[in-house]
Image (spheres, rainbow, N blue to C red):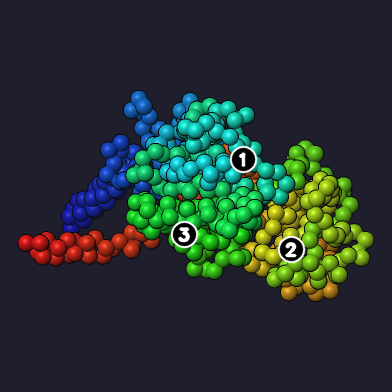
């Protein structure tokens, strides 16, 4: 071929290549930035880039608000955020990547279009929730007036508080309906069930067990059992429950003994639990359920007041029940191994009297705090240690931890297998081998992540309430995936049955 023929051919090849590249690039931009995109909202909301979610939405004026894809701690929102946003976001403790989408900001109000999780909450009778607190109400009221904190019944103190998740989550959903409480836009209550991503069942099951599981007076059936039976009967008659067999419903059963009578019948729902210690795998598992932190009972140590390495004279601290059943027998073994060590505090303790305050002071002056399996794999002691900035040492092989898909606990906890912990000198040699620099790094991380374990009203960005809604939101995708797979042939069967019914009727 002549030199004149080669040059035009090459030129034509370059032109075609460049044109194809520009065509592909323009298609990508159209998909991402068009207001009339044919990609559904639910899919657009889950687009992932650099392990981060982003969603493009037009504001009231029709102007497009663009959020960048976060990939580092230094990333900033370059576009203007609506006045109700303050630009706060939750960071992953490991790499600084976003745990939640950038629109999950602290907002005075949160619209249905902005919320990453839309929740339909049943208006259950007063006896199922705030009535269990002994609260009074007007005959026409189902819920307390969350705009007036003084009208909200207080949750019982003491150890009752450690399983109070249902209380804080319910208050947060109620607060999403008002602009009076500044809260993160993690979840919003919707009144139309067709708009909901999940359905929340506001039964204070842990409180029901703690306060109403024993027979009183002439009762033949406890209030706790009656409420569970009523709840099952109610849900089984709801169209929302029967549509997917309850798989898109959220039920809080944080106390290990809560929902004992109903858990099997309602086991298809998404449970919010402390652990799986008293559940068969078919009823509760990580695939569908969420582990939530206990509410700590000791006081949080402000970061500025947290004692550093040299001001924590106790190496290892444990105070609590020593003689336990099941997996908790290891406490007794460790007690006899450690009780005589001069830099170890290992003693019996309870929440009675001044016990909680004493435990808080002990943890705040210790380098390491033992979290040992008891009757169940988890205990509140882990979260008391976290808010005391005492590096937790977890000796519980079956434990499941809250938000572990976004938190790397190895950055601020030490894990020891039970079989190793009971070996003579193993645990002490391990902890004494952790020098000041390594300990200080974990201590700094504790001060950074402690906010994820606070329950409060109104909720705050990245606190325990906000984190739980984030965990629910992440489960929704897998639930929808499962439901869609199950529906592959369902509609075909429906059409077939309908056609046969039509033939028989004619």
Residue 428 in view (yes/no): yes
| Residue 195, image x, y percentages | 36, 42
Return the residue at label 1: 134
Spatial distance from mark 1 to mark 3, Cα to Cα? 27 Å
Residue 30 vertical placement versus 351 (above, below)? above
Count of numbered circles on the image = 3
Mark 1: give few (<14), some (14-19) or many (20+) Cα within 10 Å.
few
The image quarter in which residue 454 lies: top right
Between 288 and 41, the one lying in front of the other is 288
Residue located 61% across and 60% down the image: 257
Residue located 39% across and 45% down the image: 196
Q: Which of the marked residues, 1 or 3, is nearer the chain's N terminus?
A: 1
Query: Left or right of 241: which side holds 2?
Result: left
| Residue 307, image x, y percentages | 82, 44
Element under disc 3: loop
**Callout 1–callout 3 Cβ contact below 8 Å:** no
Between 345 and 105, the one lying in front of the other is 345
Return the residue at label 2: 372
Element under disc 2: strand
Spatial distance from mark 3 to mark 2, Cα to Cα? 31 Å
Return the residue at label 3: 266
| Residue 276, image x, y percentages | 59, 63
């Amino acid at each position: 071929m002549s030199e004149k023929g080669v040059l035009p051919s090459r030129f034509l090849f370059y032109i075609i290549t460049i044109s194809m590249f520009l065509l592909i690039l323009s298609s990508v931009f159209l998909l991402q930035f068009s207001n009339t995109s044919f990609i559904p909202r639910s899919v657009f909301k889950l687009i992932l880039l650099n392990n981060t979610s982003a969603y493009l939405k037009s504001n009231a004026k029709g102007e497009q608000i663009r959020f960048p894809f976060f990939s580092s701690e230094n990333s900033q929102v370059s576009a203007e955020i609506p006045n109700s946003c303050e630009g706060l976001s939750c960071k992953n403790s490991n790499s600084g990547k976003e745990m939640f989408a950038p629109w999950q900001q602290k907002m005075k109000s949160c619209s249905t279009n902005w919320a990453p999780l839309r929740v339909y909450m049943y208006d259950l009778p007063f006896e199922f929730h705030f009535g269990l607190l002994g609260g009074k109400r007007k005959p026409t009221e189902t819920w307390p007036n969350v705009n007036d904190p003084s009208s909200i019944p207080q949750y019982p103190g003491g150890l009752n508080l450690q399983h109070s998740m249902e209380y804080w989550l319910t208050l947060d959903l109620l607060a999403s309906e008002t602009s009076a409480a500044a809260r993160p836009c993690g979840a919003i209550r919707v009144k139309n069930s067709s708009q909901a991503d999940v359905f929340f069942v506001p039964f204070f099951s842990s409180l029901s067990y703690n306060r109403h599981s024993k027979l009183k007076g002439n009762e033949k059936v406890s209030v706790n059992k009656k409420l569970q039976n009523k709840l099952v009967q109610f849900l089984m008659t709801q169209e929302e429950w029967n549509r997917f067999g309850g798989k898109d419903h959220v039920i809080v059963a944080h106390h290990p003994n809560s929902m004992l009578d109903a858990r099997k019948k309602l086991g298809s729902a998404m449970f919010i639990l402390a652990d799986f210690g008293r559940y068969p795998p078919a009823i509760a598992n990580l695939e569908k359920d969420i582990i939530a932190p206990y509410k700590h009972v000791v006081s949080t140590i402000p970061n500025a007041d947290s004692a550093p390495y040299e001001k924590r004279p106790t190496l290892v601290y444990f105070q609590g029940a020593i003689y336990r059943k099941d997996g908790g027998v290891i406490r007794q073994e460790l007690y006899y191994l450690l009780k005589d060590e001069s830099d170890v505090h290992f003693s019996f303790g309870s929440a009675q009297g001044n016990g909680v305050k004493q435990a808080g002071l002990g943890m705040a002056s210790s380098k390491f705090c033992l979290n040992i399996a008891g009757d169940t794999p988890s205990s509140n002691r882990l979260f008391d240690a976290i808010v005391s900035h005492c590096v937790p040492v977890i000796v519980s092989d079956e434990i499941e931890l809250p938000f572990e898909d976004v938190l790397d606990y190895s950055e601020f906890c030490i894990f020891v297998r039970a079989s190793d912990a009971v070996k003579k000198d193993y645990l002490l040699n391990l902890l004494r081998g952790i020098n000041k620099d390594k300990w200080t790094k974990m201590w700094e991380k504790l001060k950074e992540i402690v906010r994820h374990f606070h329950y409060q009203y109104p909720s705050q960005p990245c606190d325990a309430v906000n984190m739980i809604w984030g965990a629910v939101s992440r489960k929704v995708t897998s639930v929808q995936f499962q439901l869609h797979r199950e529906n592959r042939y369902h509609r075909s069967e429906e059409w077939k049955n309908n056609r046969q019914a039509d033939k028989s009727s004619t």
